[in-house]
């Protein structure tokens, strides 16, 4: 289902669902959590699950992303709910958790339905600023090349290393870690920019104009 | 520093979206009017690099890791407006495809990392670049700018969460600022280490610091103003025991009691003997962090060896 006929409409609907779920009142301003908020979060969650299932055939990739998201959500939500009066603590905590997960699920479902290419087409259909969409498009294309370069650099680095460096070495020798990261990231940046410059020169040589 | 969805109120989300949209449109307009616009392919490549660099986590303390944000690095290499565009693209992909940072919270994240980050970082880097000439100045500026941008971004996150009613500002600000002083030092060190590698091989890449943006008063003023506001918020608890503007307004309008009732933990905390120390912690951490960042800038810039440039050895 990565070839949605109306990517603009699908993207707008997904973003709207995510935003509506994200701003539904969660009782932080005092008083109880409105029943309509729970209805919105429940509806968004169920619709997102249905879309994810029909788009990807399985829920496991979406569940993996939601699990990754749970760490910051719990960190912010649990501590925030501890600050509200005891009698409302459970309701506000549950509301914050549901609100965040419902909103994220809507975004995950939108991506599952459209795919990165569909999002770019959707943004163009929604008349998002052309330069920003061009940069986004170029970024998504370049990400594949950058990921390949990182894999190649890691391969050559591990081939040169006598023994595998344990994670503890990063804590015990922070200076080497930071300078090593700087060299790798600097080399990665140079490769990315030089590749983009070469592509740009080739495009201009073929007669491509503008930015 | 990414704020996920579900933690900002509707008003704060709308306000930050509006301000972020205005900033992005201004950056686009500036890029369109530039004499030599940067091709979208190159901006996209830089954005892809920033995205990849943000995924590599470095341990900061036991159980805590941090990663490069790259706003100052991008600003030093591209200039603040192009850095704003590249960072906005990074944040959009993170929010849309990886759910790292929310969609309703996109505006807040853009203001923290794609607007305040590049402008504050660039302003500080430009000032440092005037004091220390040549490529070494770019490294010193990048290190100090990276630290200042991170602390400013953390301050803004605290402001958004406080305004949304999630936490009292006086409670969340110390927590975020103190933790981000450590992360800011990591950002500063990584920015410096990357700049050393880049300037060794391609000194032309840090041309933005010598460009017109570094001399434009409006750009500099925006960056310095942002950092000054952050400093005022951080140093606020040290400066005066009288109620701050928000508290004074709450007292005048008569909702101060209601606010205290909504946040009993903070109200109780103010009565504790160590509360003054906790509220003063951001100022102390900020001062210590700035000193550490200056030392870091000196140490990292000494490792820069530009061929044929003996003054930087």
Image (cartoon, helix red, strand yellow):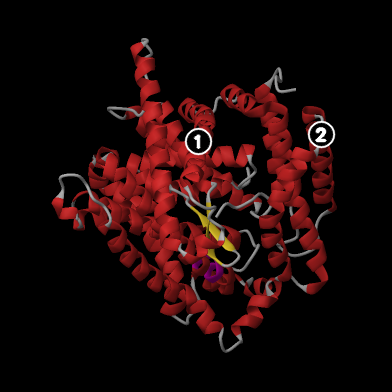
Q: Residue at x 45, y 35 (%)?
A: B25
Name which of mark 2 and mark 1 comes first in the sequence.
2
Check disc 2 and report the residue beneath it.
Answer: A58
Q: Are both tags, 2 and 1, on one chain?
A: yes
The chain holding disc 2 is: A
Q: Which mark is residue B244?
A: none
Q: Residue furthest front?
A: A162
Q: Which mark is residue A152?
A: 1
For the question of whether residue B187 can be seen, the reply is: no
- The percent coordinates of residue B22 (x first, y second) are 47, 40
The region drawn magenta spans B173-177
Compared to residue A21, the image places residue B181 above or below, namely: below
**Which mark lies nearer to you, 2 or 1?**
1
Q: Where is the N terminus of chain B found, in terms of image quarters?
A: bottom right
Compared to residue B168, the image places residue B214 above or below, namely: above
Q: Residue at x 82, y 71 (%)?
A: A87
- The percent coordinates of residue B120 (x first, y second) are 37, 54
For the residue labelled by badge 1, is the local secondary structure a helix, a strand or a loop?
helix
Q: Is residue A54 magenta?
A: no
Secondary structure mainly formed by the magenta segment: helix
- The percent coordinates of residue B288 (x first, y second) are 39, 73
């Amino acid at each position: 289902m990565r070839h949605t006929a109306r990517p603009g409409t699908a993207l707008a609907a997904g973003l709207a669902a995510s935003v509506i779920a994200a701003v539904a009142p969660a009782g932080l301003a005092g008083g109880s959590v409105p029943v309509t908020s729970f209805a919105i979060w429940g509806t968004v969650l169920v619709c997102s699950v249905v879309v994810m299932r029909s788009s990807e055939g399985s829920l496991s990739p979406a569940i993996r992303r939601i699990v990754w998201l749970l760490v910051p959500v719990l960190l912010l939500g649990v501590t925030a709910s501890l600050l509200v009066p005891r009698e409302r603590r459970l309701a506000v905590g549950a509301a914050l958790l549901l609100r965040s997960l419902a909103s994220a699920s809507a975004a995950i479902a939108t991506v599952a339905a459209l795919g990165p290419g569909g999002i770019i087409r959707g943004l163009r259909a929604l008349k998002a600023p052309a330069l920003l969409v061009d940069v986004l498009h170029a970024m998504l294309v370049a990400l594949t090349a950058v990921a390949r370069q990182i894999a190649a650099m890691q391969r050559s680095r591990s081939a040169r290393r006598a023994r595998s460096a344990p994670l503890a070495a990063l804590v015990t020798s922070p200076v080497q870690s930071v300078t090593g990261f700087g060299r790798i990231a600097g080399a990665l940046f140079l490769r990315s920019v030089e590749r983009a410059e070469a592509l740009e020169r080739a495009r201009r040589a073929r007669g491509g104009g503008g930015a | 520093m990414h704020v996920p969805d579900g933690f900002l109120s509707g008003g704060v989300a709308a306000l930050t979206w509006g301000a972020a949209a205005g900033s992005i449109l201004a950056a686009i307009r500036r890029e369109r009017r530039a004499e030599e616009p940067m091709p979208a392919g190159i901006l996209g490549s830089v954005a892809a690099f920033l995205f990849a660099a943000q995924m590599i986590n470095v341990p900061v303390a036991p159980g805590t890791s941090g990663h490069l944000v790259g706003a100052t690095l991008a600003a030093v290499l591209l200039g603040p407006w192009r850095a704003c565009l590249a960072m906005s693209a990074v944040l959009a992909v993170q929010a849309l495809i990886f759910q790292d940072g929310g969609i309703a919270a996109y505006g807040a994240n853009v203001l923290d990392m794609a607007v305040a980050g590049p402008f504050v970082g660039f302003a500080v880097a430009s000032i440092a670049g005037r004091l220390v000439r040549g490529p070494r100045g770019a490294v010193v500026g990048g290190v100090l700018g990276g630290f200042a941008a991170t602390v400013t971004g953390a301050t803004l996150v605290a402001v958004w969460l406080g305004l949304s009613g999630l936490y009292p500002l006086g409670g969340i600000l110390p927590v975020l600022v103190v933790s981000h002083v450590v992360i800011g030092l990591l950002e500063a060190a990584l920015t410096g280490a990357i700049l050393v590698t880049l300037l060794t091989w391609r000194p032309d890449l840090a041309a933005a610091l010598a460009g017109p943006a570094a001399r434009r008063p409006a750009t500099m003023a925006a960056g310095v103003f942002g950092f000054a506001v952050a400093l005022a918020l951080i140093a606020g608890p040290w400066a005066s025991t009288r109620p701050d503007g928000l508290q004074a307004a709450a007292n005048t309008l008569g909702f101060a009691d209601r606010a205290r009732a909504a946040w009993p933990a903070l109200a109780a905390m103010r009565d504790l003997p160590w509360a003054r120390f906790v509220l003063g912690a951001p100022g102390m951490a900020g001062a210590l962090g700035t000193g550490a960042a200056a030392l870091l800038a000196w140490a990292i810039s000494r490792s820069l060896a530009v061929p044929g440039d003996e003054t930087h050895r």
